[in-house]
Image (cartoon, helix red, strand yellow):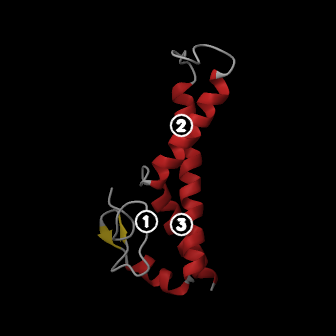
Amino acid sequence: MASLINSTAGSMPNKALMPMFNGRPDPVLQEALQKVSPQAQAKAKATATDFESMFLNTMFSQMTTGLKGDGPFGDTVGTGPWRSMLTDQYAKNFAKSGGVGISNEVFRSLILQQANKS
């Protein structure tokens, strides 16, 4: 899936040429971005990335629930909290580097809602 903004995944330039949505130019989002302050845009982007991170953390946690540990932690009491922290960091890093596209959809929705309020 193409990035929402014409840039590298996970970052948003100050002035994008034309926002993209599903691989096509998105004039509706471009108009909405002009109505929303840069601070609100940055906050919406951070919120969208946090939401995707939370979703990915839930998904990764479900994937690793039944695994038995090997190595220094093995199958001990400490495996659960350690694995929880590890999946949390995986999810945050995955979302920051572009994720699976959920944050793009959430960002677009947040910006459109904020633009309609003004």
Give the residue at x 51% y 15%.
70
Give the residue at x 48% y 51%.
95
Q: Residues within 10 Å of mark 2 (few under 14, many from 20)?
A: few
Amino acid found under the numbered disc labelled 1: Ser
**Where is residue 83, by image quadrant?**
top right
Q: Which residue is mark 1?
A: 11
The circle drawn on residue 45 is 3
Q: Please state the horizontal and vertical placement of residue 88, each as a whole percent of the image.
A: 58, 40
Q: Please state the horizontal and vertical placement of residue 11, each as a whole percent of the image.
A: 43, 65
Amino acid found under the numbered disc labelled 2: Met
Give the residue at x 36% y 62%.
3
Mark 1 and mark 3: Cα distance apart in space: 9 Å
The mark nearer the N terminus, 1 or 3, is: 1
In this figure, what is the number of numbered marks? 3
- Between circles 1 and 3, the one closer to the viewer is 1
Query: Do the residues under discs 3 and 2 have CB atoms within 8 angstroms?
Result: no
The mark nearer the N terminus, 3 or 2, is: 3
Q: Please state the horizontal and vertical placement of residue 85, each as a whole percent of the image.
A: 62, 36
